[in-house]
Image: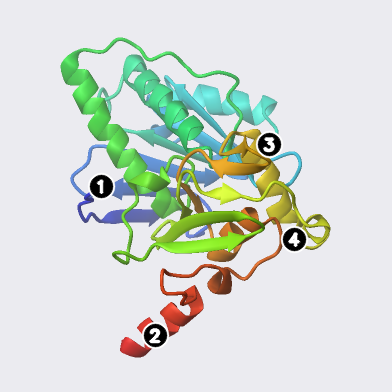
């Protein structure tokens, strides 16, 4: 995917970098509003909250392992956010997208909500709190085209805000050409590469069927992540082991190696190129070439 450069203007409305932030993208009619849950009562009378938009609620899962996401739409967003403030416990941060007055209507934001839910389910990067996917509304050809552009802008902004729930690893360009690496052990083999999104393990790669007893005790987060990937179908049973059903991005090569090998692992040592050089050796060589 070829991405074009763009700039963002982030306005910190109350002087607190963790407080209310308004984010605008160059040459775009939309605006993102980012804020912690605790601020909603004091900021909800702002004009942006009275507009039609699509929103995300983010917060920790009940088991404490990772984040959960809820996607919704509101006409206006204020009413929905007030309801979630009173009734939905998990979320600690909200992000919503609006445009100028009259630019978005109910059908538009239903289209955005439907597509964001589909993308989050397909990416399988974050637990989704939505009970079911929302049906896509009927839009004219022109409106669909406009909303696709709006959606593309939303998806471009979210990773900059630290939200990666919608990213598909297969759409991320490889930084280093021909830098495909392999991780082997316990009769399995996986291939992957470094990208801007993290370390991507390619579809059809294998992962061991059993974890080492020490994994649950010493690297519990990776153990739980592995079980989550099994439960959500990223890892599928395959002749006593598991195979990856899709390209999947991990936050580090060590996490990727641990999932593949079923134990704690130093990814800079476990991942090797076709000539047997470790990722650590490759990185040291590249650093020296700089």
Mark 4 vs mark 2: give the one in front. Answer: 2
Q: CA distance from mark 4 to mark 3?
A: 25 Å
Side (left or right) of 192 relative to 85 = left
Q: Which residue of the protein is positioned furthest toward the bottom in this rendering?
A: 288
Mark 4: give few (<14), some (14-19) or many (20+) Cα within 10 Å. Answer: some
Q: Upstream in the sequence, badge 1 or badge 3?
A: 1
Q: Upstream in the sequence, badge 1 or badge 2?
A: 1
Q: Upstream in the sequence, badge 4 or badge 2?
A: 4
How many numbered circles are shown? 4
Mark 4 vs 2: CB contact within 8 A: no
> Circle 2 is placed at which residue position?
285
Residue 219's quadrant in the figure? bottom right
Identify the coloring. Answer: rainbow
Q: Which residue of the protein is positioned furthest toward the top in this rendering?
A: 138
The image's mark for residue 90 is 3
Q: Upstream in the sequence, badge 1 or badge 4?
A: 1
> Circle 1 is placed at which residue position?
1
Q: CA distance from mark 1 to mark 4?
A: 35 Å
Mark 3: give few (<14), some (14-19) or many (20+) Cα within 10 Å. Answer: some
Mark 1 vs 3: CB contact within 8 A: no
**Residue 156, position as x, y percentages in the image:** 33, 46
- Residue 199 seen in the current view: no
Mark 4 vs mark 3: give the one in front. Answer: 4
> Circle 4 is placed at which residue position?
219
Residue 137, above or below 198: above
Q: Upstream in the sequence, badge 4 or badge 3?
A: 3
Residue 275, above or below 190: below
Considering depth in this image, is 56 or 198 the residue closer to the camera? 198
């Amino acid at each position: 995917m070829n991405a074009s450069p763009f700039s963002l203007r982030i306005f910190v409305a109350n002087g607190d970098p963790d407080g209310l932030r308004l984010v605008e993208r160059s040459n775009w009619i939309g605006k993102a509003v980012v804020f912690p849950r605790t601020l909603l009562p004091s900021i909800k009378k702002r004009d942006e909250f009275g507009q039609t938009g699509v929103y995300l609620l983010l917060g920790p899962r009940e088991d404490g392992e990772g984040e959960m996401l809820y996607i919704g739409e509101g006409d206006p967003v204020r009413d929905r956010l007030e309801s979630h403030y009173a009734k939905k416990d998990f979320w600690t941060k909200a992000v919503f997208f609006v445009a100028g007055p009259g630019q978005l209507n109910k059908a538009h934001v239903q289209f955005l909500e439907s597509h964001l839910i589909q993308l989050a389910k397909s990416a399988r990067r974050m637990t989704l709190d939505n009970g079911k996917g929302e049906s896509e509304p009927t839009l004219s050809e022109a409106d669909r085209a406009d909303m696709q552009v709006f959606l593309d802008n939303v998806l471009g902004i979210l990773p900059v805000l630290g939200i990666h729930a919608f990213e598909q690893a297969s759409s991320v360009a490889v930084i280093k050409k021909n830098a495909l690496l392999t991780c082997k052990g316990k009769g399995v083999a996986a291939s992957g590469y470094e990208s801007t999104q993290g370390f991507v393990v390619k579809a059809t790669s294998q992962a061991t069927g059993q974890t080492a007893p020490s994994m649950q005790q010493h690297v519990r987060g990776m153990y739980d992540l592995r079980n989550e990937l099994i439960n959500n179908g990223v890892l599928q049973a395959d002749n006593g082991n598991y195979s990856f059903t899709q390209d999947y991005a991990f936050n580090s090569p060590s996490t990727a190696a641990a999932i593949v090998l079923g134990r704690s692992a130093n990814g800079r040592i476990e991942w090797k190129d076709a000539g047997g050089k470790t990722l650590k050796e490759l990185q040291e060589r590249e650093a020296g070439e700089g």
